[in-house]
Amino acid sequence: MISNNAIAKHGVLTCFFILLFVDMATAQMAMISAAERKVTSLNGYWDVIIDPTGIGDWRQVWLEHKPEKKSDFFEYSFQGGPQLKVPGDFNSQKPELTYFEGTVWYKKQFNYEPKKGKRLFIYFGAVNYRTDVFLNGKKIGSHEGGFTPFQFEISAPVKAGLNTIIVKVNNTRYQNGIPGKGYDWLNYGGITRDVNLIETNNTYIDDYSIQLKKGSLNTVLGWVQLNGERPRQNISINIPELNLSYHAKTNDEGIAKVEFSSAFKLWSPSSPKLYRLIIESETDTVADDIGFRSIEVKGSKIMLNGKPVFLKAVNIHEENPYKAARARNKEDALLLLNAAKKLGCNMVRLAHYPHNENMVKEAEKMGLMVWSEIPVYQHIEFADTVVTQKMERMMEEMIKRDKNRCGVIIWSLSNETYPSAPNRNNALIALTKKCRNVDSTRLITHVINSQQYENNTFDVWDTLGRYADIVSINEYVGWYTPWQGLPANTKWKLICPEKPVFISEFGGEALYGSNNGPTDEAAYWTEAYQAKIYTSQVAMFGTVPNLCGVCPWLLFDYRSLGRMHPVYQKGYNRKGLLSEKGEKKKAWYMMKEYYSKK
């Protein structure tokens, strides 16, 4: 053991050599359907050390040094310190952490008895933003990204009896992070989603894709992937309700191609049908609830199950407004999604990052289509090759988790990026091509806001539109940009006039109950001024060529530190149709009426 005195004497130099020999393994992409496995939850209260100066690395917190001589002491301890609940953001759990961006060390202990023929993984639903994981004093790996699952295999280092997991979490913003340094939501840090131990056999079902073939209404085209020492196995796929049983054999890489047909009752917003599907290999069994639907673009229309569909959507942040905390569980998801249903929505845009699995699964059960997005938002360093690698990794993690969720119809690969940013076009075009290679069955989009608005005409010129299935536009005319003529007389010049057009953000801010100021002045944050924006926007929607849907920004007022007006904002973005207390603003009723007529 390196003594406290040695660390103090040699300082940073000693720390450098210590870290040099630490295992820097990157996290594995998580197995899908984790909840369907043999799971031991590590949720609950974890002991923590709050580390605002980042000195925990130097002090080697993960080793939990104990005094050996009377003169020994160590300036840290998990024992006697605070606790934080997992899953949960740390910002909402303690007042002193409300605006904290930095390092928190988490500790949890568990008992385990290793078994012959079994493997053990530790699974994290998401941790924001950078994560280092230590087991029994040794680093097992790292992960970057705050909104997708990852795992580490701990079959070898886990020991019989009591084991200790220590997790270093850092939510500091980085210039080459994704998202980058600047974004318009609270940077909730911590272990924000479930942590589970998952025990499997030596060879287990790691991944599968069971969805309808592109353009088909009755044929599944997919695959099953095994992981382990016995890659060649017989597998079967069973859907008891349909009396369907399909058999195949995996190859030397553990992959079996899947293709079968049936008279499926198709999933749709009006009939969100899901089938219980069971996948069996010779060494593992996984079950899932899967729906079947077709989504594609034909000409200027979006087609769901071969019929045109208008996307009546709303933007949602992953925040429980009543708790002012990161949404994380089924109850949080139902709160948000039920509010969207009451508005009349058939789709939710889960902005601006992949939301927790409860949101996606519950939306699917309720008949809400889902737009899922990676956090490529505004200030991204596209010229940094490390950033482009991170983008691809986050996209793959998002798709791996949710590719069997038929409710997910759109992968969004960027939001409000700057065409002038070096290498932006090349990076996002390449990412789009990779996304199509990974999953060709869904629609792909990039959200743009670089259009010019002059003489009451929108010039939508961003080249990303050429590579997307739908042209998605954020525009805040009436709020950030004044109207230049009658909304009903708006003209459009589109880079891809043949494609569907989706208004992915619009709106303005209003404080619920603010009705005392002039109704024609934005500075008073009145509901009447917000309602006027919505009246004009609805009139403008009638001028949009190939309009396939609209999506107001947004459902609830949400926390954003850049919103500093002490009277009207108080740290909230007030563009919600509902206040953070769930109170309906005048604009809510306008969108409700608009959607009821579509």
Image: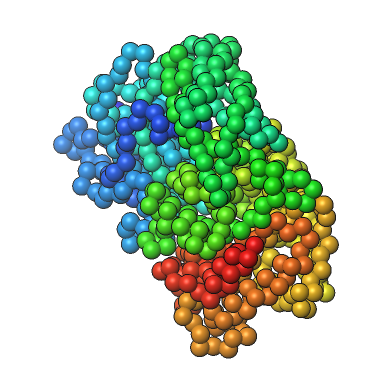
Above or below for 514 versus 471: below
Q: Nearer the viewer, residue 513 or 572?
A: 513
Rendering quarter of residue 156: top left
Q: Position of residue 322 (x, y in %)?
A: 38, 63
Q: Position of residue 378 (x, y in %)?
A: 64, 56
Q: Residue at x 63, y 23 (%)?
A: 259
Q: Residue at x 25, y 28 (%)?
A: 111
Above or below for 185 versus 403: below
Above or below for 497 versus 537: above
In the rendered image, the quadrant that contains the N terminus is top left
Residue 158 seen in this snapshot: yes
Q: Residue furthest left?
A: 70
Q: Residue at x 78, y 78 (%)?
A: 485
Q: Residue at x 58, y 76 (%)?
A: 530
Q: Is residue 351 left or right of residue 546?
A: left
Q: How many marks?
A: 0
